[in-house]
Image (cartoon, grey):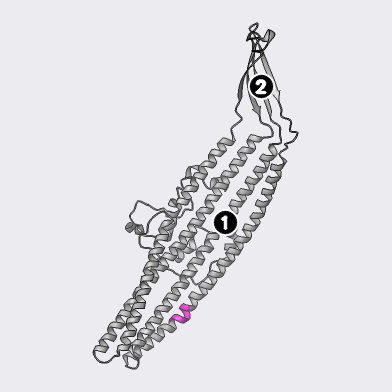
């Protein structure tokens, strides 16, 4: 599809969510509209201030095409000769008055080449919009996953505080009954204070990530509905071969190709300037002495004795060569970014699977054994809560690894498919 069809001029106000993300009604209140990833992406695509600003660049490029098609304006000249002289030419008696109209006729296809250049610049503006939209959507998706992870961390922190309070209450009861040591309650109070501090940090992080997420559609965190989604790590990784094939459709490549086309047109415009324009003129001359008139016709052509526009031509050629080399560099950078995202994805995926497969069962087994020992009077209560704390720590580690996988997947799909089907599936509610 040609680039100029990516963004129709009538869509310069960022309407219609060009990525076909989701059909969303923004007139609903937050309680009526659960915030899924696709809803967040649709809002960002529709309402992001940076994208709205770029829409004006699209309108400006349309205006420049119109201007490029304008022909030189004609020139009208009125001149008087043979007046206010000496001798026979004293006064106005023998004066001549000439009214003349001149029109410059452009040669070398200047007008057509200007139009082609403006059209390519419009396509480059459209491609730039797509690149910026891709960046905005990637940042939104990352903010969404960070917000979701922060809310899950908040739940874990609340559970840790609850467990610490239960431990303190149980030990206090034991101390009052004479079965416990005040040292144990002091340690329990310290653990509760630490858990409450972790909870405060988790609350602040959750509020910060919600505020960051809302800024991508110029909203506030108070307008956010509860996030809907779970970090559901799949058993297998995405298809790396397919992703490498999709990399060729990255918007940055399309943008650079549009810039190359624009540079080629710039070179053609520079070459067209070497063609000499012709100015044709015609008019009427009035002789005051005998009230006669006569036609005046003329043609003028500049002599390009010094300026052959060679400097601009060389500059345009150098810029074109630089743009073509930049395309090579962009492709190499995208491959490197894809490889890095893939490695991050693999590492996080392996970490999540290993923790769930090995560490989680071992921790749960240890907790069960400690609880059994405590029930039989063989193990103190503090060891039970220590085992619970170890399980909470493992849950946070697993959550961190799951979020690392989600973030790597967002970066991976930002390079290959910015509708984020894999990330959406990852975060789908159970």
Residue 363 location, x and y as percent?
A: 42, 83
For residue 266, which quarter of the picture?
top right
Q: Residue 281 carries which label?
A: 2
Name the secondary structure under disc 1.
loop
- Going 60% across and 60% down the picture, which residue do you hit? 334
Label 1 belongs to which residue?
250
Residue 220 location, x and y as percent?
A: 37, 57
Mark count: 2
- Local crowd size for mark 2, using a 10 Å CA cut-off: few (<14), some (14–19), many (≥20): some
Residue 135, placed above or below residue 401: above
Q: Which of marks 2 and 1 is nearer the N terminus?
A: 1
Please say whether residue 8 is visible from this viewpoint: no
Say which of 338 and 179 sits in front.
179
- Asked if residue 96 lies left or right of residue 430, the reply is right
Q: Distance between the residues labelled 2 and 1?
A: 54 Å
Q: Residue 41 carries which label?
A: none
- Local crowd size for mark 1, using a 10 Å CA cut-off: few (<14), some (14–19), many (≥20): some
Residues in magenta, as a range: 355-360
Residue 396 location, x and y as percent?
A: 42, 75
Residue 90, placed above or below residue 382: above
Q: Quadrant of the C terminus?
A: bottom left
- Asked if residue 15 lies left or right of residue 200, the reply is right
Name the secondary structure under disc 2.
strand
- Going 41% across and 86% down the picture, which residue do you hit? 366
- Going 46% across and 55% down the picture, which residue do you hit? 21
Residue 421, placed above or below residue 400: above
Residue 286 location, x and y as percent?
A: 64, 11
């Amino acid at each position: 599809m040609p680039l100029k069809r990516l963004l129709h001029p009538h869509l310069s106000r960022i309407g219609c969510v060009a990525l076909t993300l989701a059909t969303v009604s923004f007139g609903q209140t937050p309680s009526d509209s659960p915030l899924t990833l696709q809803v967040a992406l649709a809002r960002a695509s529709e309402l992001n201030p940076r994208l709205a600003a770029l829409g004006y660049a699209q309108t400006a490029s349309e205006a420049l095409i119109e201007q490029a098609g304008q022909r030189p304006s004609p020139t009208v000249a009125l001149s008087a000769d043979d007046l206010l002289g000496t001798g026979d030419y004293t006064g106005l008696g023998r004066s001549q008055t000439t009214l003349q109209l001149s029109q410059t006729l452009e040669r070398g296809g200047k007008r057509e080449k200007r139009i082609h250049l403006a059209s390519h610049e419009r396509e480059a503006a459209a491609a730039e919009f797509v690149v910026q939209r891709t960046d905005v959507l990637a940042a939104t998706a990352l903010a969404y996953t960070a917000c979701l992870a922060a809310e899950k961390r908040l739940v874990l922190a609340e559970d840790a505080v609850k467990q610490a309070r239960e431990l303190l209450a149980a030990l206090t009861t034991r101390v009052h009954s004479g079965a416990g040591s005040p040292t144990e309650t002091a340690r329990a109070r310290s653990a509760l204070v630490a858990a409450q501090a972790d909870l405060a940090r988790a609350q602040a992080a959750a509020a910060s990530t919600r505020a960051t997420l809302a800024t991508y559609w110029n909203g506030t965190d108070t307008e956010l509905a509860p996030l809907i989604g779970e970090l559901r790590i799949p058993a297998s990784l995405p298809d790396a071969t397919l992703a490498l094939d999709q990399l060729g459709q990255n918007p940055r490549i399309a943008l650079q190709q549009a810039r190359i086309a624009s540079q080629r047109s710039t070179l053609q415009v520079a070459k067209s300037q070497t063609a000499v324009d012709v100015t044709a003129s015609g008019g009427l001359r009035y002789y005051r002495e005998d009230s006669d008139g006569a036609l005046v016709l003329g043609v003028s052509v500049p002599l390009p004795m010094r300026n052959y526009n060679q400097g601009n031509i060389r500059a345009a050629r150098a810029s074109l060569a630089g743009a073509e080399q930049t395309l090579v560099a962009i492709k190499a950078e995208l491959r490197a970014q894809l490889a890095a995202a893939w490695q991050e994805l693999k590492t996080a995926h392996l970490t999540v699977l290993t923790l769930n497969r090995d560490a989680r069962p071992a921790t749960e087994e240890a907790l069960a054994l400690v609880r059994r020992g405590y029930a039989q009077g063989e193990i103190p209560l503090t060891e039970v809560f220590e085992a619970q704390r170890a399980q909470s720590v493992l849950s946070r580690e697993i959550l961190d690894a799951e979020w690392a996988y989600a973030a790597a997947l967002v970066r991976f799909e930002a390079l290959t498919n910015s509708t984020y089907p894999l990330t959406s599936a990852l975060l789908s509610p159970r």
